[in-house]
Image: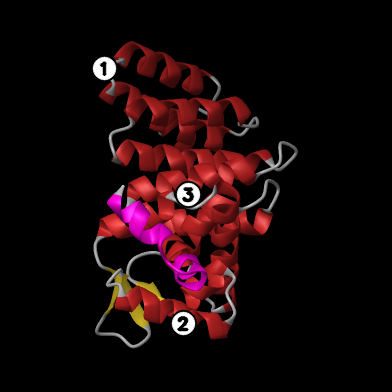
């Protein structure tokens, strides 16, 4: 409550810059925070000076980079942002990062919050970010794969949705969300065309998750069903 009052007492430029910085991250680049806030350059200097004077943000060792006095300050600033303005701020931040040629991982969090349904370019960025983060940050990867899935139109290619579901399932399994991982794989299997390779790959992954869930009978049944659908008993699919 005290932090909210402190932020509410700021001038317009300082408050907007604090909100833009809260959207961008901590530490934050002043120009990127200003872009997220939709501020004119002249207002940025005045807003930054007030934030520094009130010790809400502090300088870092890097030029033009600043950090909030405490993570709670950023949380209070972010939670105080109206929903519509926050949506626009994430969209502006994503556009600014794209213009700078930032990596998909840097843009993904903003696209997750702001991308529009049917935006295939944004879905592609989220998928790339998920693939890049899958080994070191599987929780983030699972979120970004889910966000990409939400953006795909229902009429889109089934193969793309299946690949995203499989990637999300692997990320979920890596963080121990086994039931959700299984659900994603079953959804992928329901969409799979008459392709032995795709069906076998998803079935094998699903069976592995079901074993970890303590459901070996279901795993065995899924494997037998997939094996029965393979025409050549000596094929790589049958062996798998």
Q: Is residue 24 visible?
A: yes
Per the rendered image, the range of residues in magenta is 2-17
Residue 144 lies, in percent from the top left, at: 48, 49
Looking at the image, which is closer to me, 17 or 33?
17
Determine if residue 234 is in view. no
Q: Identify the image quadrant of residue 188.
A: top right
Q: Nearer the viewer, mark 2 or mark 1?
A: 2
Residue 193 rendering spot, x and y as whole percentages: 65, 32
Q: Is residue 14 magenta?
A: yes
Q: Secondary structure at mark 1?
A: loop
Q: Which residue is mark 2?
A: 46
2 or 3: mark nearer the eye: 2
Residue at image mark 1: 214
Q: Residue 75: which disc?
A: none
Furthest-top residue in this view: 217
- In the picture of the structure, the residue carrying the numbered disc 3 is 144
Query: Counting residues from the N terminus, which is met first, the one under dot 2 or under dot 3?
Result: 2
Q: How many marks?
A: 3
Q: Is residue 110 left or right of residue 9?
A: right
How crowded pointer 1 is (Cα within 10 Å; few <14, some 14-19, many 20+) is rated as: few
Among numbered discs 2 and 1, the one appearing first in the sequence? 2
Rounded to the nearest angstrom, the CA distance separating label 2 from label 3 is: 36 Å
Q: Nearer the viewer, residue 94 or 135?
A: 94
- Does dot 2 land on a helix, a strand or a loop? helix
112 is higher (above) or lower (below) than 63: above
């Amino acid at each position: 409550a005290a932090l909210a009052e402190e932020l509410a007492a700021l001038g317009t430029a300082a408050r907007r810059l604090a909100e833009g910085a809260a959207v961008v991250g901590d530490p934050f680049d002043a120009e990127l925070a200003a872009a997220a806030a939709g501020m004119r350059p002249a207002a940025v200097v005045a807003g930054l000076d007030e934030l520094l004077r009130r010790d809400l943000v502090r300088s870092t060792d890097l030029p033009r980079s600043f950090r909030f006095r405490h993570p709670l300050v950023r949380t209070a600033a972010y939670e105080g942002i109206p929903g519509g303005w926050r949506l626009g701020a994430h969209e502006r931040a994503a556009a600014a990062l794209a213009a700078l040629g930032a990596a998909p991982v840097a843009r993904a969090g903003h696209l997750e919050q702001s991308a529009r349904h049917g935006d295939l370019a944004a879905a592609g960025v989220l998928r790339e970010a998920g693939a890049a983060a899958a080994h070191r940050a599987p929780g983030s990867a699972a979120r970004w794969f889910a966000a990409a899935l939400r953006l795909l139109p229902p009429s889109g290619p089934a193969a793309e949705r299946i690949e995203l579901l499989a990637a999300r399932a692997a990320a979920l399994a890596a963080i121990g969300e086994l039931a959700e991982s299984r659900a994603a794989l079953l959804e992928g299997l329901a969409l799979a065309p008459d392709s032995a390779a795709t069906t076998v790959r998803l079935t094998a992954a699903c069976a592995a998750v079901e074993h970890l869930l303590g459901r070996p009978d279901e795993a065995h049944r899924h494997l037998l069903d997939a094996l029965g659908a393979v025409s050549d008993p000596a094929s790589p699919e049958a062996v798998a």
